[in-house]
Image (cartoon, rainbow, N blue to C red):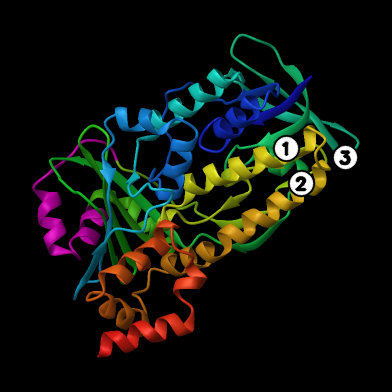
Amino acid sequence: MYDAIIVGARCAGSPTAMLLARNGYRVLLLDRALFPSDTLSVHYIHQPGIARLARWGLLQQVIDSGCPAVPGLKVDLGPFALEGNPPPCEGFAFGYAPRRFILDKILVDAASAAGAEVRERFIVEDLVFDGERVIGIKGRSPGDGTSTKLAKVVIGADGMNSLVARRVGAAEYNARPSLTCTYYSYWENLPVERAELYPRENRMIVVGPTNHNKTLVIVYWPVEEFARVRLDIEASFMAAIDKVPALAARIRAARRSEPFRGTKLLPNFYRKPFGPGWALVGDAGYHKDPITAQGITDAFRDADLLANAIHLGLSGSADLDIALEAYETERNAATLPMYEMTLQHASLQPPPPEMQQLMGALIHNQEQANRFLGTMAGTVPIPEFFAPEHIGTLLLAGAS
């Protein structure tokens, strides 16, 4: 019997497996993919996620892949733009946007090196129950029949459409339907140093550097426009880009090097992330619109929290259910302010006048501009920065 079986080996599953294996547990990590492989993702990692990669000893591999550092952000509202560098996290001042076929392979290999048993191209078909408690999984790999694997805990790291979550009936809460749809691709000869954000009415455009001297360009539309957009993706994409003429000129002078990829399936929800013999991590337990690019950073944090909770429970240091309840509480406290901010961005409406007034005041206050950008990066607490007395002080200083 395994101590833990983890279904899904990408940004949440592999780190969870790695951390449990490093603590001496017998871990089975399963995924239907064969790595390296790509997946739909905006693939940006904010500074808190970079700090975790460094703590785990994996950051240098991302750097060695040729992925460029992203030192800061630019938010262009049209009449003016705010630029700066978010405050660092644990000394790490840069973000990175590694391609998923590079990052996920690094994570899977790290789990294997830690001692986890990794099985790729393994399709989990069902869970095994003893009464209401999950005690294992049933699945198959190419050339083999269906087999059963048993464990003390089964972890669903299998994304927003999680089989584990469906089979255990994990309850959703704080749910909102998809607000946006998106398409993205990659351009060559489109140099960019910072991550660039261009909020426009009913549109958001994001630009950032990634591996192989390519630049990722993403466009978001209201989800209601998906059917129209997909009829002619390139025309719709460029029509959105044309809302920012200077950016459009840069992109038209460059060369798109990959097909467009996109989706309208971007729901927003929390799920109860634990129950008898099971737990959820990453997008399986908490999913939000990717417009704030928090997915990978959140997955890393939740892998840390969940692995610690399971270690406390399996080692006898705490009751497992109590430790997992604390995991849910910590996850929710860490994510709720960003969840609400993400929903605001996903409405695709221009910042309200008071926010534009604030950003205008920050143009002349670089320290506070950096802290404002830090709320997006997760290095400055959102409630702290947007406390009414703090905002009042900034607006008063901007008016003087």
Secondary structure found at label 3: loop
Q: Which residues are magenta?
A: 235-259
- Whether residue 169 is visible, yes or no, is no
Q: Is residue 60 left or right of residue 122?
A: left
- Residue furthest toward the right? 131
Residue at the disc numbered 2: 323
Q: CA distance from mark 3 to mark 2?
A: 19 Å
Residue at the disc numbered 3: 132
4 or 319: which is nearer to us? 319
Q: CA distance from mark 3 to mark 1?
A: 19 Å
Local crowd size for mark 2, using a 10 Å CA cut-off: few (<14), some (14–19), many (≥20) = many
Magenta highlight on residue 211 = no
Secondary structure found at label 2: helix
Residue at the disc numbered 1: 310
Q: Please state the horizontal and vertical placement of residue 39, each as a whole percent of the image.
A: 43, 35
82 or 282: which is nearer to us? 82
Three-letter code, disc 2: Ala
Q: Please state the horizontal and vertical placement of residue 305, each as a whole percent of the image.
A: 63, 45
Sequence-first tag of 3 and 2: 3
Q: Which mark is residue 118?
A: none
